[in-house]
């Protein structure tokens, strides 16, 4: 009967270690999935930023052409205050595009950070799973040895 108890202790420890390893592997897979989502989201953000920038550029162009037409219609020339106004408008329009680019880059950096964090989490979980398996095996071996030595004395 002593041998059976020792074997059961070892088997129980191994099963505990395997279960722990599987739990950590599931967590690692969740982190890997989240990392993949971050990559996908970054591409979506890039595409959205590009579309917003193009839309704004078209709106800016239309506004600039409208102002040109209004100035030409009134018979003014592109000198003095009309030129100053138009140059200010162009500068503001360029800034609006820069703001879109900046916000897009920030959102993409956020996804890079999420990707890196998730990859680190996956790596940690995989390591923890391996240590959980080793720990379970050692615990089972100790339990088996303890049971066997308690029967001897």
Image (cartoon, helix red, strand yellow):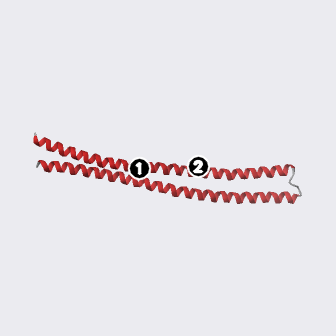
Q: Tell me residue 125's x, y (percent).
A: 38, 49
Dot 2 surroundings within 10 Å: few (below 14), some, or many (20 or more)?
few
Q: Which residue is mark 1?
A: 123
Q: Which residue is mark 2?
A: 106
Name the secondary structure under disc 1.
helix
Counting residues from the start of the chain, the first of labels 1 and 2 encountered is 2
Residue at (15% x, 48% y) in the render? 5
- Front residue of this view, candidates 1 and 66: 1
For the C terminus, give its image quadrant. top left
Residue at (40% x, 52% y) in the render? 28
Q: How many marks?
A: 2
Q: Tell me residue 136's x, y (percent).
A: 27, 47
Residue at (75% x, 50% y) in the render? 91
Name the secondary structure under disc 2.
helix
Apparent side of residue 92 relative to residue 69 in the rendered image (left or right): left
- Front residue of this view, candidates 81 and 10: 10
């Amino acid at each position: 009967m002593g041998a059976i108890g020792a074997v059961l202790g070892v088997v129980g420890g191994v099963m505990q270690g395997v279960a722990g390893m599987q739990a950590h592997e599931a967590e690692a897979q969740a982190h890997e999935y989240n990392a993949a989502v971050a990559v996908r989201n970054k591409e979506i953000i890039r595409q959205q930023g590009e579309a917003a920038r193009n839309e704004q550029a078209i709106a800016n162009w239309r506004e600039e052409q409208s102002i040109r037409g209004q100035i030409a219609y009134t018979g003014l020339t592109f000198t003095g205050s009309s030129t100053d106004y138009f140059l200010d408008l162009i500068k503001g329009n360029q800034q609006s595009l820069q703001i879109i680019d900046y916000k897009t880059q920030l959102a993409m950096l956020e996804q890079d950070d999420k990707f890196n964090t998730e990859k680190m989490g996956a790596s940690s979980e995989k390591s923890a799973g391996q240590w959980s398996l080793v720990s379970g095996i050692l615990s089972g071996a100790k339990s088996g040895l303890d049971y066997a030595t308690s029967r001897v004395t």
